[in-house]
Image: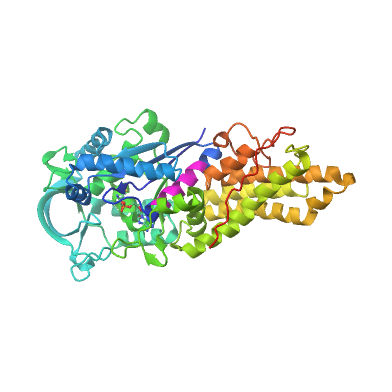
Amino acid sequence: MSKFYITTAIDYVNNVPHLGTAYEKIAADAIARFKRLQGFDTRFLMGNDEHSTNVEKAAREQGLDPIAYCDKMAEIFRGVWKRLDISYDDFIRTTEPRHIRGVQALFERIAAKGDIYKGKYEGYYCVSCERFYPEKDLIDGKCPDHKTPAKFLSEDNYFFKLSKYGPPLLEHIRANPGFIVPEIRRNEIVNVIEGGLEDISVSRSTGTWGIPLPIDASQTVYVWFDALINYITGVGYPETNGTFQRYWPADVHVIGKDITRFHCIIWPAMLMSAGVPLPRKVLGHGWVHFQGEKLSKSLGNIVSPLEIADRWGADSLRYYVLKEVPLWRDGDFTWDLFIQRYNSDLANDWGNLFTRTVSMIHRYREGKLATVEPGDGVGDVIRDALRESRAAVDRYELEGAIEAAWTIIRRANRLVEERAPWNLAKDPTKAEDLDRLLGTLAVALQHTALLLFPIMPSKAAQVWDTLRLEPGIDQARFPVDGALLRPPPTGTPLGESKPLFPRIER
Ligand code: ME8
């Protein structure tokens, strides 16, 4: 069986998850779920990035020991991901012994290669980015991203010979056009490398909140050097048999556009130095804004994904962000558009197809299907949708996969209008036509559940179970190309027609 290994950024835990971090996890989750449906042996890794100065500061502000604080935050993060139905297979924390061991092993290999040397770092550092800045990149002495003053540091540190890896990195990027997507990110990275890479400091001499350097325990590993390694410690590194051998290299790292440089320059250079194969792809997704503004604490517009999920369900939040914020560009969350999408796409289109189909089968046929051969060309619409969904996911266009499901929904709803089953039901000579129509609608609905399961897992499961399909939808697999799923049973009464998405009244 082919494998598929997908990761997200690991989050800093100085704040709780917000809409932006949730978006990334929802998108990666949908991809992982699609891959499982397509029969891949899928591994989905997430985690928390704990050795940051900001995390330590947040802990101290709460009067907690950093590790006690991180334990508490890990529970909070996991709770949010559970509520949003994020189906990670493993969750790594950078304070775990398995990670620390792997970081030290990789560091030692890089040092053994002769790529680490001692030097003096003098320059600016933004604590929020956890990154060193050349003075020329600061604006009035402030971080261009966070607009907060950068700190001047002067420390004896260990450096990594990043400069040496510019040429092989460029060669790799040119030989593998799919390595960095979307293209705009790829061009950005190529420009940075062509501008010349400088060696980077990879240790800190102040503080103890971090992983001790294996070659000098008086220093800790620079937090980014530490964090990036989670992608391999999460599959067992430094052990290179078993899980690591099975899943590495990762098929895709899903991360935000602000941190592509770490993932497309520093990380692959570290791996090249250590002789570990590079990940296949880095996907630098866009930003989610809220009501047109950047999400920021100072603007006070940090919406909790839980608030949306608690009011309108996790599935409708998942649907909204995946439909409205394609991975390759920025997008916006507004309450107006959310309510509009919810009422028109979810309540009217999909929800209505579900309730009307199931209610008619109850009303006219005591809940039982007589035949499940899709007619009226619906079989072909489904076959095309299955193909298009798969192709869209291969291009990481989740909005395209949603659209594929909607071709079935629209066709089926139109069929109801055209064939007017309420009239067929009045005419005993049309009984067979009605049976065929109801069977067609049920099969259409079944396939919408399959295609939307990665996007809206809990509503898709409701549709699936109502149609009395077995085993459960989490065991379902895409049919082979050109085929349809095994249809719902005939003669077994369907479940109740409970509304999928009760309308939101303004
Ligand atoms: O950067 N829209 O952690 P983080 C979309 N610990 N994505 C957003 C976003 C928004 N408004 N805001 C943040 C870190 N993100 C490091 C990563 S990985 C080895 C270490 C994304 O908690 C952001 O781009 O600041 C990143 O991919 C993720 O959320 C975590 O951000």
Give whichever of 90, 173 is nearer the camera. Answer: 90
Q: For residue 285, what is the image quadrant?
A: bottom left
Q: Which residues are magenta?
A: 22-33
Residue 113 visible in image = no
Q: Residue at x 48, y 58 (%)?
A: 326
Q: Which residue is the extreme one toward the right?
A: 429
Query: Position of 5 compared to 471: left or right?
Result: left
Where's residue 28, x and y in %? 44, 47
Magenta residues, dominant SS class: helix
Give whichever of 502, 124 is nearer the camera. Answer: 502
Query: Position of 374 compared to 91: left or right?
Result: right
Q: Residue at x 78, y 37 (%)?
A: 370
Q: For residue 496, what is the image quadrant?
A: top right
Give whichever of 127, 64 is nearer the camera. Answer: 64
Query: Position of 16 compared to 334: left or right?
Result: left
Q: Residue at x 24, y 46 (%)?
A: 225
Where's residue 165, x and y in %? 28, 51
Q: Does residue 394 show up magenta in the picture?
A: no
Q: Which residue is the extreme one toward the top?
A: 242
Q: Residue at x 49, y 46 (%)?
A: 30
Q: Does residue 25 show up magenta in the picture?
A: yes
